[in-house]
Amino acid sequence: MPPGIANAAISERWLLLLSGPPSDLTIVNIRAAYGPAFEDVLIKLARALAAKQLSNISIDVGIIQVGIEDPAYPKSTTFPGYQKLTSLLYRLICMQCAKLGYDADFESAADFCIFFIRDDQSESQAQNTNGPEINLVILGRCSRPWTRLLTVESEEGEHLSKRFLSARHSFSQRAATLAHERLRGGTSIVRPPKDGGIGSKAVAQGKSYRSVAVGGTFDHLHPGHKLLLTATAHLLVSATPQGEEGSLDERRLIVGITGDELLKNKKYAEHLENWEDREASVFRFLNSILSFAGLDSGDNSVQHRSSQGADGRSVDHILQSGLTIHCEEISDAYGPTITDESIQALVLSGETRTGGKAVNDKRVEKGWEPLDIFEVDVLDPSEESEELGSSEDAADYSGKISSTSIRKRLQERK
C-alpha cells in the first residue's frame, strides 16, 4: 500500500443530496439555488467539529444530473456543461467559507467532493458502481459509512431522500440508520428541457475516452485541483459490466504529478507536501468520486502497485471495476503524454492551455495522433465581484484555491 493511504481515515462522513441545477448556469443562479443549503451545511460542520472534537468530516455532495440520463452519451459533448456546473459549485463553497470567516483549520477539516446522480429509476445500470455519475439506486446501496443525510426542505428534496433511503434500507439489513436533517432551500429552480442542461442532444457527434490524462503539482489539494480531477474523470467512457463488450481493464485515468526536485524553488517550499503525500491525496479524492461499491460487494479493497523507474515513481490503483488510476512522477512539462501513445485526451486549466499545443506538437513529431484537449475554468474570485455586483456578496476566497497561499498561511502560523 502506498505511503499515506493507511492514515487516510475519515472521522465522519456526510451525504448531501441536491436537486437539479438552474437552466442558466451562472454564479448568481447557483448561489440563489444552493447558497442557503451550503451555508447551513458549513454551520453544521463547524458545530460538529467543535462539539465532537473530530479531526475531519468528509461531505459527499450528490447533485441530480439534468438533461442527459443515458450513461453511454458521448462525454466530450457533456463536458462543457459538466465542468462549468462543477466549477460553480466549488466556487460557491469557497465563497460561503469566506463569507462565514472560516479559516484554514476549518477548511482542512471539511473535505467536499462533488459527483452527479442519474435519477432514471432504472435497474439497467445495477452493476455499474463507477462515478463520477452514479445511478440513485446504486448510491443507496453504497457501503460508505455515512452518519448524516442532508437534503433540502422542499417537495423535490423529500422525493429525492425517500428514493435514496428506500434503496438503502430495502437492499440490506446491514445499512446503518442515517440521521436525516433538512436544510433551507433556495429560490425555485426552473428545469431545462430534455435537450439542454449539462449536455445538449442537439450535438449529434461526440467522443468518450478509455485513456485520459491530467497533470499538476497537486500540493495541499484544494477546490481548483478537485475541479480538474473531476472533469478528467468525467471524460472516461462509462463502465460496462464485466464480460460485456468493452473490457473495463482498458480504462485508465493518468495523473502526472510534479516531482519534488522541480518544486524546491517554490515559495514557502518548506511547507510543500512530498510526492508520496500528494499522490495519496490525489488517489483518495479520485476514489471518493469514482468508486461506489455496494453493501453486498464483499471485498471492496483497491489493488495498489508501486514501481520505481528511470523516469521516477509511479503507482497504479486498480479499482474493483477494473479502472486503473495511474499516478506518475513527472520531471518536465510533458510527462506520460509523449511516452504513452495510448492516451487519447488531456485536460488542462485555463492557466496552462499553451501546454496542450506543446504536447501535441511533440506527439505529431513522433507520428502519433494528437490528443483531444479539454479546458476547465479557473476558479477566480474576481469574477464574483463582476457577476454579483457587490464586493460584500463576493467574498474573496483567493487564498483558498492557491497552494502558494496555503503554504504562506502555514508559514505565518509557525
Image (cartoon, rainbow, N blue to C red):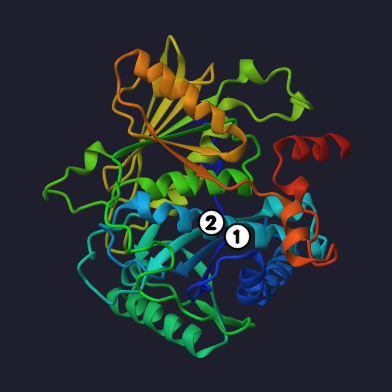
Q: Can you give x and y, in whole percent of width and height, for residue 164 in the image?
A: 39, 77
Q: Residue furthest bottom?
A: 155
- Please state the horizontal and vertical placement of residue 225, each as a whole percent of the image: 58, 43
Residue 309: image x %, image y %?
Answer: 41, 13
- The label shown at residue 84 is 2
Residue 370 percent across, percent down from the top left? 35, 27
Classed neighbour count for the residue bearing mark 2: other residues with Cα under 10 Å, few (<14), some (14–19), many (≥20)? some
Q: Is residue 328 left or right of residue 56?
A: left
Identify the image quadrant of residue 119: bottom left
Of residues 400 and 82, the one nearer the viewer is: 82
For the point 62% across and 15% down, which residue is it?
261
351 lies left or right of 280: right
Q: Is residue 249 visible?
A: yes
Residue tagged 1: 88
- Residue drawn at point x = 55 percent, y = 41 percent: 7
Q: Is residue 114 above or below residue 38?
A: above
